Image (tube, helix red, strand yellow):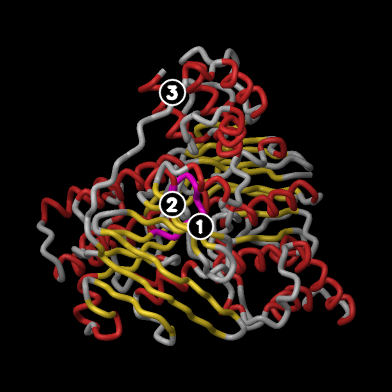
Amino acid sequence: MGINVCNISLQIDGKKILNNISFSVDEGENMLILGPSGAGKTSLINVLTGIIPNNIPGKIEGEIEIDGISPENQREEFIQRAGIIFQNPDDMFATLKVEDEIAFSLERRDISFAKIKEKIKSVLEEMHLAGFESREIATLSGGEKQKLAVACVEATEPKYLFLDEPTALLDPISTAHFFSFLHATNRQFVIVEHKIDRITDLISKVLLINENGEMEYFGEPRGVFESCKESRYYKPKLINLSCALNRKGIIDEITDDREKIANAVNENVSKFQKKETTHYKESGIMAEIEELKFSYGDKLFQYGNYIIYKGKIHVILGNNGVGKTTLLNIIADFEKQYSGKIKLFGSELRKIKRDVLYKNIGYVFQNPETMFFHDTVKEEIEYMKMHSDTDKGETEKWIKIFHLEKTLALSPFNISTGEKRRLSILLMVLGGKKLILIDEPTFGQDYETKIKTVELLKKVREKGISMIIVTHDTDVAFDIGDFISVMKTGGQMETFRAGDKNILTALETSDPVIEITEAIIGQHEDFPLLLTVEQWEEYCENYL
């Protein structure tokens, strides 16, 4: 019977979030929801699943039926059909251990204990979490928690999946595994997702919501994907790449076929000249790590040696659970039981007074809500201004750059995930820190805002501020990193300067743009190292 939505509008705290949304999705069709950060994508998922208004207050107008059932008024019937994955997996968990959490989702369905044990084993294997049964959920990485959330939902075998950025916390390998799961499952799904290259073949309908919460487009994917005239921010990477090449006459058609793109470039490879290598000026050392080791439980992280230079951006890439966030926690002096030496600002970390340390070092957490303490966004900003030298004019400039002007009167807990992330970074920028540690800076942000965040962080670098950024996003890493470290299991790191082709041997990624460039370099050693769509676009514009 499918999903039928008629003239849905939503207000929360007097603010209009969604405005007159209507669409129908037939049984068996999958729908992708696109739109800028703050457009109301998460709110629409919450309305479709009855979370608003049953769990989150909100005023709804219009009608929703899923298989003829109202998610708002027929909760038990709806829950039997639907599985929901939230942006923040911690919002889903009700127990302490992995196996207990999966069992909890099954027990209310009158399933035998033996069947529950069997189901726990199978879904953990499916989500690449085999052997995690007795692990405490609190000890899991963000990506591991996200995979557990998917396992809990899949265990119930729902007809429909409602997925709110399910890969936001996953590394490239885990993302590929999740998309393989979507290809293999027979579940019908509605998904909010920015990494769309691997699922375009699964999508039957696309709903595009604009910044005012209005429906800008609903229909078949090709209406958004297959034209260079439409916004570049809601297209697969390879479509944008072929558009850039098409403008320069390298390829005749707009396509996401990587073989056609690679062949077109190879046929014109003489036009691609190797860019000059960037020569770095010595900027002095901000922090230095020597023979660092840390363990908890049965995990041992051997980080070794690591140098952070003044005014540079250091990016750490790595799979879920290898110890990236743990390293940031050690540098921030949250974890003290380590061996080795850490020097910050010329002094040994263990000897720096806490007030001096936190005046000079800032931390942007993976979950931005842990940083908020006030009733409104404006109050959060005003509090940070009280503890820094940033003047009013400078503050207003940064607020506009971060696109947070419209949120000032709102609670920081009620703005979108992308807006929360931008606010958390803004607070540290306004705090006048010398070194900022940032855990997943683009989590929850759309493509356009991600690019703007990268540009913003480059401006922060121009002020001489050092940053260590942990991310799964290779686009962010290669567009912004002066130094890029690839962390392996156990914390071992290999560090490369930007533009060093040797990084290709260390990466574990299925990114289609990187795969194309790597294949071309395999045949033409002097081909420029273009690892993101933005780098290809910039090269085509400036060199072809």
Residue sitting nearer the eye, 422 or 71: 422
Task: Specify the segment rendered in magenta.
Answer: 469-477
Res 399 seen here = no
Disc 2 marks a residue whose amino acid type is Phe
As drawn, 364 above or below 237: below
Mark toward the viewer: 1 or 3 = 3
* Disc 3, SS: loop
Of mark 2 and mark 3, the one earlier in the sequence is 3
* Disc 1, SS: strand
Kindly give the residue lying farthest to the front in the view shown.
525
As drawn, 242 above or below 363: above
Res 155 seen here = yes
Question: Which quadrant of the figure contains the N terminus?
Answer: top right
Q: Residue under circle 1?
A: 486
Q: In this view, does 259 lie to the left or right of 536?
A: right
Tell me if residue 527 is in the magenta stretch.
Answer: no
Question: Which numbered disc covers residue 273?
Answer: 3
Of mark 1 and mark 2, the one earlier in the sequence is 1
Residue drawn at x 39%, y 85% is 336
Question: Which numbered disc covers residue 496?
Answer: 2
Q: Is residue 526 left or right of residue 67?
A: left
